[in-house]
Image (cartoon, rainbow, N blue to C red):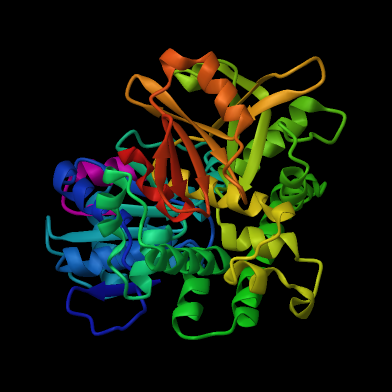
Amino acid sequence: MENMTGDSTKQKRVFERKAYGTLKEWKKRSGGSTAILVEGARRVGKSTLVEEFARREYSAYVLIDFSEENRDVNALFEDLSDIDRLLRGLQLQTGVELKERDAVIIFDEVQRFPRARESIRALVKDGRYDYIETGSLISIRKNVKNIRIPSEEERMKLHPLDFEEFLWANGNHTFRLLEQDLDSRKPLPDSLHRRMMMLYNEYMAVGGMPQAVEAFVNGASYQEIDRIKRNILDLYMEDFHKIDSTGSLGLYFSSIPSELSRQSNRFRIKGKSMRGEMKRISEMVESQTVQRSMHANDPRIGLPMTLEPEMFKMFLEDTGLFITLCFRDREFSDNSIYAALIGGKLPANLGYVYENAIAQGLTAAGYGLFYHTFPKDSKHNYEIDFVIPSGKRVCPIEVKSSSISSHVSLDEFMRKHRTDIKRGIVISTKNLKEENGIVYLPIYMTGLIGRI
């Protein structure tokens, strides 16, 4: 358990995050009428974010870490009918004096102590302080039996650092200057394009997990960064085993790179019970370590209305972890992907790395993941890698790892659904341009795709 006042001198490396603005908006709008639950995968930076927010936006705060056993604190939640006793007890236990309407209480890893989450209803109604919770959705759902879920609880998801946040961490705040180039559809100067691709390649290699980013910023080798990512993957595998002792969850997670490399239009379910396996897949998605792209049967506006429940693709939430997972069975010294990626020479057969990166970028930009297939002939299908809404129409996206001269699936889709399309998009490593109703978007601009 930690406790802090607003004038603490404690120092900690904290990266600038866009989610900080979301918390500020919640504080201003809510005025104490709701609590907020910050969800996300392990090691994504939830605790660091909310503690920094508390330190900067309130005169004092208390952070209660429920991952650490504290019987005296836990006992305070036994009787929720006496909120005065509970709040006095928290202040006595932490030694922090809380000022009404200018203090926040943080329930960190709240899924480990469901009784605290249940207390949110009464605490919010009391109205003296603000409340922020952090936790993993999958663990929360598994620990809500016999407790009343508070309706006074808002939720927000925290993802790994996106490309712009990665640049911020490295002292670069120029990303938004690219908006003018995107709006004009004019190619960037070659030197700038090469520079942005080099930075984006570094981002893919490192990923957006704060611990890996911090190591990169501090000058660590890629070998050390890879070791950090392997440790995170080990934590995820341990969690999956706790959830599912059969090992199926860990197997599905480990097989994501191979499933994408097969270029199959659906994830291969292994096992006799489809219902049971789909439940396990859903639990993996709820852990927020992965993202699921659903097949939309009708690729027009209202994409979630025509989903094929058993037809989907899987991506890792973080592309840096994805790269490490691809070669997790090898020693780092045998792994040539880092040199190839940083050098801009990633082999075409590893193009699915870019697909995972784009999935991560679209998710960070607030888009759900959908893809679409349609018949080419009796044995083959056309495939659109992603479909995103744009106003009352859609934008089909094709991912290209090398040449952009051919995009047969996109061309056929645009011919077939001409009136439903705003414009086609090809995302690749090439420079920006627009031709024949198609925007050729460099991969580092994925986060700006909403401007197209």
User: Residue at the spot x=64%, y=20% of the render?
Assistant: 308
User: Residue at the spot x=49%, y=78% of the render?
Assistant: 216
Residue 372 position in % (x across, y down): 60, 25
Tell how many labels.
Answer: 0
Q: Is residue 130 magenta?
A: yes
Q: In what quadrant of the picture does the C terminus appear?
A: top left
Above-or-below relation of 234 to 114:
below
User: Residue at the spot x=36%, y=62% of the render?
Assistant: 189
Query: What span is colored magenta in the figure?
Result: 118-131
- Can residue 188 be seen here? yes
Camera-side residue of 369 and 247: 369
Q: Is residue 270 magenta?
A: no
Q: Is residue 296 left or right of residue 244?
A: left
Residue 86 location, quadrant: bottom left
- Can residue 64 be seen here? no
Above-or-below relation of 116 to 168:
above
Q: Residue furthest right?
A: 272
Residue 158 position in % (x across, y down): 42, 52
Camera-side residue of 245 and 219: 219
Residue 343 location, quadrant: bottom right
Above-or-below relation of 337 to 439:
below
Residue 281 position in % (x across, y down): 68, 38
